[in-house]
Image (cartoon, helix red, strand yellow):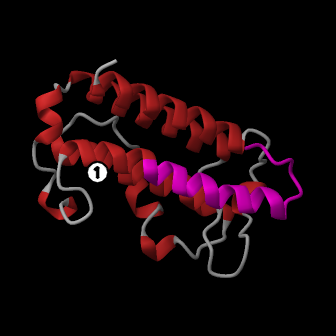
Amino acid sequence: MNPIELFADTLNRTMGMFTATLADFSDEDMLVRPCPGANHAAWQVGHLISAETRMVNGVTAGAAAELPAGFDTKFSKETSGVDDPTQFPGKKALLDQLAKTRAGSIAWVKTLTPADLDKPAPERMQRMCPTVGHLIGLMMGHMSMHMGQLQVIRRKLGKPILF
């Protein structure tokens, strides 16, 4: 397995675990905060979608799956405290968009060569991920970090422990 195949496979596997984490959430569960100041699942999913889109497009303009109009503004730092269910898409819409976004990211990764992984990441990201390879690693780690936060919401809701 070469690094491109490994990255594509790991992006896919991380997505599978993430969607399994939310499989038994209702639309109402998506708006539960584990504690004051923590983000609810709906905002976290939208944030992941927006962030991954920016990362991929930052390396290869237009390579990411297109977002619905106004999507980014619904999932900004300024909206992280919003609890109004009318301000966020429902669970199905969010997971459908996440699936499109991640499929687009995987397709993009498969266009890269091992040499591309050593190219500089977008300037605004270089502090955290100096190369394209690091940026792809960040995409996996970012989703995993949020998956851990969703596990806390699962416990608050009394849902079974999955992993």
Residue 124 picture quarter: bottom left
Residue 138, percent from left and from top: 36, 51
Residue 47, percent from left and from top: 47, 57
Split into 4 quadrants, where in the image is the N terminus? top left
Residue 42 picture quarter: bottom right
Q: Is residue 110 above or below residue 155?
A: above
Q: Residue furthest front?
A: 1
* In front of the other: 64 or 111: 111
Callout 1: helix, strand or loop? Answer: helix
Categorize mark 1 by other alpha carbons within 10 Å: few (<14), some (14-19), many (20+): some
Residue 36, percent from left and from top: 69, 81
Q: Residue furthest right?
A: 158
Residue 143 colored in magenta in the image: yes
Residue at point 60% right, 69% down?
39
Disc 1 residue type (three-letter) = Arg
* In front of the other: 52 or 125: 125
Q: Is residue 4 above or below residue 79?
A: above
Q: Left of 154 or right of it: where is 41?
A: left
Residue 47 colored in magenta in the image: no
Residue occupied by mark 1: 54
Split into 4 quadrants, where in the image is the C terminus? top right
Q: Magenta span: helix, strand or loop, mainly?
A: helix
The magenta region covers: 141-163
Residue at point 65% right, 64% down?
40
Residue 162, percent from left and from top: 77, 43
Q: Is residue 47 above or below residue 100?
A: below
Q: Left of 81 or right of it: where is 84?
A: right
Residue at point 37% right, 54% down?
51
Q: Left of 147 or right of it: where is 105?
A: left
- Could you tell me if residue 70 is visible in this image? no
Residue at point 74% right, 65% down?
32
